[in-house]
């Protein structure tokens, strides 16, 4: 190549520049192919390690982008372009882009953390970022939730990650609590026995941890009772509502009253006493 160029009416410096440019172009072509191969190898390795597909695609593209950036610096340096000003320009450009996309980069960072640490999965019922619903999807930028009334909420990952996350399904069981009051004239032991029988008769209520009923308070309107029981996450609401109805029906059949808040009023006849100044 050098001998062929030497026969042309070109100076030695021009010939060297042409050779460097040709080498740089070859480096660019080979480097792009090699960067793609390395990125694909990293992606397959992450698949074998059971890394989340969303995170796998992001890391694959990030690896490819970093390799291409390094390749461009090497190619331009081979072509005779000074590398120091180029690196400085890339750094300044990266800083400007980072400041302009500060919110998006924050969402991206939290998205990676949520995918890596997995505080919740698709299908879990969670409360996070001031929203409560079922997780429909998790991307690098936002989390989609389906609310109980079938509305859809798209919550930025920054808001999800910076708030407390309550996962109602993670452990597979949930405890519900019901409070009620009976009258002072009613038999407390009898009422508690009825509730225990109803708890034992419902197959959805778990035996471990054991359900129970306790006397909680003595109020102006009656004796406060509290009952607590564990169910699977999917059975909690149904078991609670059915238990309330069964308690009301049994109490009514046995003459046990469910107390309601009450006030005593005293009516006085006659003229009010005169006030003296």
Image: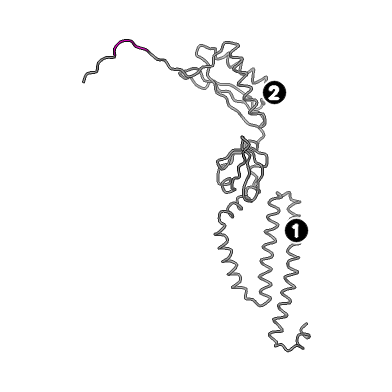
Q: Secondary structure at mark 2?
A: loop
- What is the x, y in percent for residue 9? 73, 89
Residue ID for mark 1: 40
Binning the other alpha carbons within 10 Å of mark 2 as few (below 14), some (14 to 19) or many (20 upward) gives few
* Residue at 73% in and 77% down: 22
Q: Which residue is mark 2?
A: 203
Residue 98's image quarter?
Answer: bottom right
Within 10 Å of disc 1 (Cα), the crowding (few <14, some 14-19, many 20+) is some
Relative image position of residue 6 (x, y in whole percent): 75, 87
Where's the C terminus, which quadrant?
Answer: top left
- Residue 46 position, x and y percent, is 73, 53
Quadrant in the picture for the N terminus = bottom right
Q: Is residue 67 above or below residue 177?
A: below
> 185 left or right of 76?
left
Q: Earlier in the sequence, mark 2 or mark 1?
A: 1
The magenta segment:
267-271
| SS assignment at label 1 | helix
């Amino acid at each position: 190549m050098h001998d062929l160029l030497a026969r042309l009416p070109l100076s030695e410096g021009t010939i060297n520049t042409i050779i460097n440019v040709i080498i740089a172009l070859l480096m660019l072509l080979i480097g792009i192919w090699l960067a793609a191969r390395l990125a694909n190898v990293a992606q397959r390795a992450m698949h074998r390690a059971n890394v989340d597909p969303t995170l796998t695609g992001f890391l694959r593209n990030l690896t490819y982008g970093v390799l291409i950036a390094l390749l461009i610096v090497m190619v331009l340096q081979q072509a005779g372009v000074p590398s120091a000003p180029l690196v400085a320009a890339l750094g300044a450009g990266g800083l400007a882009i980072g400041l302009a996309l500060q919110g998006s980069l924050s969402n991206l960072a939290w998205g990676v953390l949520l995918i890596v640490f997995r505080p919740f999965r698709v299908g879990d019922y969670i409360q996070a970022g001031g929203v409560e619903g079922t997780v429909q999807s998790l991307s690098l930028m936002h989390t989609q939730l389906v609310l109980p009334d079938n509305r859809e909420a798209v919550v930025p990952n920054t808001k999800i990650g910076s708030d407390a996350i309550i996962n109602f399904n993670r452990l597979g069981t949930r405890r519900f609590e019901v409070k009620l009051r009976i009258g002072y004239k009613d038999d407390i032991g009898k009422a508690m026995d009825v509730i225990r029988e109803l708890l034992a008769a419902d197959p959805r209520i778990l035996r471990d941890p054991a359900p129970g009923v306790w006397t909680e308070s003595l109020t102006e309107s009656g004796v406060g009772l509290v009952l607590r029981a564990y169910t699977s996450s999917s059975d909690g609401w149904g078991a609670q509502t059915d238990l309330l109805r069964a308690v009301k029906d049994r109490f009514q059949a046995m003459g046990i009253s469910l107390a309601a808040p009450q006030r005593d009023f005293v009516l006085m006849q006659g003229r009010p006493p005169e006030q003296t100044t």
